[in-house]
Structure formats: structure tokens, C-alpha cells
Amino acid sequence: MKRIFVNSYSLPFFLLSIFLFAILILEGMVSDWGRLSGSLGNLTKFIQESLWPPDWSVVEPQAYPVCTVYPTFMDFTCSTAWIGLIETIKIAFVSTVFGMILSLPFSLLAARNLNSSWVSYSSRFLLAAFRSLPSLIWAIFFVILIGFGPLAGVLAMTVYTVGYLGKLQYESIEGMAKTPLDAAEAMGLSKLETAFEVVIPESANDLISQAIFMFEYNFRHGTVIGIVGAGGIGYYINLYLKFLQYDKVIAYLIIIFIVVLIIDFISIKARSYFTEEVEHNSPSWISVFLPSFISK
């Protein structure tokens, strides 16, 4: 297959063409642009009347069931915000671990440099099926199947993790150098021995980095699946949405935003130790949400 190369002169024209094409598609999708005229005023009114200021009672201890902690300054651990947040982290961690373990055999079978075409594409078909539905849809399915609670969230996130992480893994395996595989074949190693003694050690850094990224991804999505009853902080967000208590909802969202920034920073720093680069520049807080050329 002949590759298409885009040079520095044709790139701006190419991007402009794509942008104009997207505008034409959007024009056909929107029938009434006049609805945007009052949107800013509606947003301002909604923020002033319903969202702001946030109701920080969500970080106060629950009245029921009674929760006592010592020392007393730790009583925020009895709040719905803390309980929901910890449950979301647990769901993300467990589903990432289970998903990584289950996805590895699929990724080894899906790699074209390790198996025949029919084995490879059959495994890719299964991985594509797992990730074809978003985790929210899987959560609805498992809530119907086993009922409300964090178990439904763990199962939903695990299935999606297998599909998503499996794709990242087999692409990483296919990108490894051919020399170790040729050496393994020359030594007469079986496919199982090649996988455990050559492929996994050679790809270990990428696999660990991908798993850390997947945990970060699962936490963000774990805050959403609770809305359908699959556990986590999303359960409380959905509860207060039903009662139109938007000031409490925005307090939860601010907490989630802060925690996501912290996890992003930890994730970037952790993944930097599993890259192939010689020099590791420790990320700063500002680099988490600003481009590198601005944060320098």
C-alpha cells in the first residue's frame, strides 16, 4: 500500500479543507442557529440561581448511619463525598488489575507477529466487541443482570478495560524489535515460552505504563457509571440531580476535578519511569493542564 506524505506546505491546506468539510456537515445537522442567541444568558442565570455557591455540606459527616472517627478532624471520612470517592477509586483499581490480567492473553493471541492471521483476527474481533460499547452501557447491562452496587461497576469497567487495554497491548507487542523473536525461534522456544520469556519482558515497560494510564481513565469513567447505579460517587451525583440540588452537584464536580488533577500528576510521574527515554524530566503541576510550550 502506497503511503500518503503530507509536507509542510500542503498541511495547512489539508487541515483547512478538513475544517471546512466539518463545518458543512455541522450546517446540515443544525436546523436553527437562533437557539444559541440566549444560551449565554441562560447559563449565567443557571449558575447564579442554582449552581453557585457550592453546598459543601457534602464533605460533612452523614447524620445516618452514625459514624464516629478518632481523631475528630478526620470526620470528613464519614461524608458522602469521601465514601463515594473512595468507592470510585476502588472500582477503578480492581477493574484495572483484573482487566490487565485478562487482556494480556488476548493481546498475545492478537499480535500478528506471534500468531497466524486467523488466530490474530479472531482475538482482535473479541477485543473490539468488548470495547465497542462504552463502559456506561456495560454498567447498565450488569445493573440489570446483578442489581445495583459496586460489583456491577467493577464488571463493567473490567470488560471495557480488557477491550481497550488489549488493543494497546497488542499494538505495543507488534511494535517490538524483530531480533528477540528471531533469536527465540532459533533457540527452538515454544510460543508459550516466547511469550513469557521474550515478549512480556521486552514489552514490560509499555504494559505497565498502559496499565497506569488505564487506571486514570477508569477513575474518570467510574465517576459516571455510578449515575446508573453501578456504585461510586456518581450515585450521589445522580441522587442530588433528581432532587434538583445543583449546588451539591457542583461541589461533587469540583472535588472530582481536583482528584483527577492529582491522579493525572501521579500518573504522568509514574509513567515517566517506564518509558524508553534516557532522561526523565519530572512533570510539574502546571504541566498537567497546560501545554508544554506554555508551562516551560
Image (cartoon, rainbow, N blue to C red):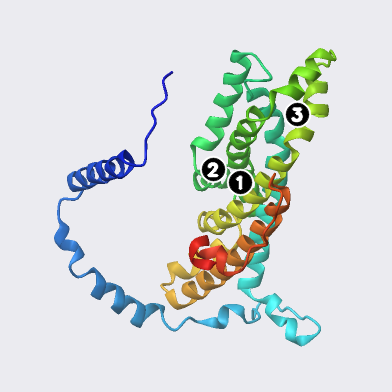
Residue 134 horizontal/vertical position (percent): 50, 43
Mark 1 and mark 2 lie on one chain; the one further toward the N terminus is 2
The residue labelled by disc 3 is: 199
Q: Which residue is drawn at 64% across and 63% down?
A: 283
Say which quadrant the C terminus sits in: bottom right
Residue 36 horizontal/vertical position (percent): 20, 64
- 73 horizontally vs 160: left or right: right
Residue 18 horizontal/vertical position (percent): 28, 41
Mark 3 and mark 2 lie on one chain; the one further toward the N terminus is 2
**Given the image, on which type of amino acid does mark 3 rest?**
Val
From the viewer's perspective, is the residue at label 3 or at label 2 nearer? 3
Q: In which quarter of the image is residue 178?
A: top right
Name the element at disc 1. Answer: helix
The residue labelled by disc 1 is: 157
Viewer-closest of 195 and 292: 292
Mark 3, residues whose alpha carbon is within 10 Å: few (<14), some, or many (≥20)? many
Gap in angstroms between the C-alphas marked 1 and 2: 8 Å
Gap in angstroms between the C-alphas marked 1 and 3: 26 Å
Label ID, residue 138: 2
Gap in angstroms between the C-alphas marked 3 and 2: 31 Å
Name the element at disc 3. Answer: helix
Say which quadrant the N terminus sits in: top left
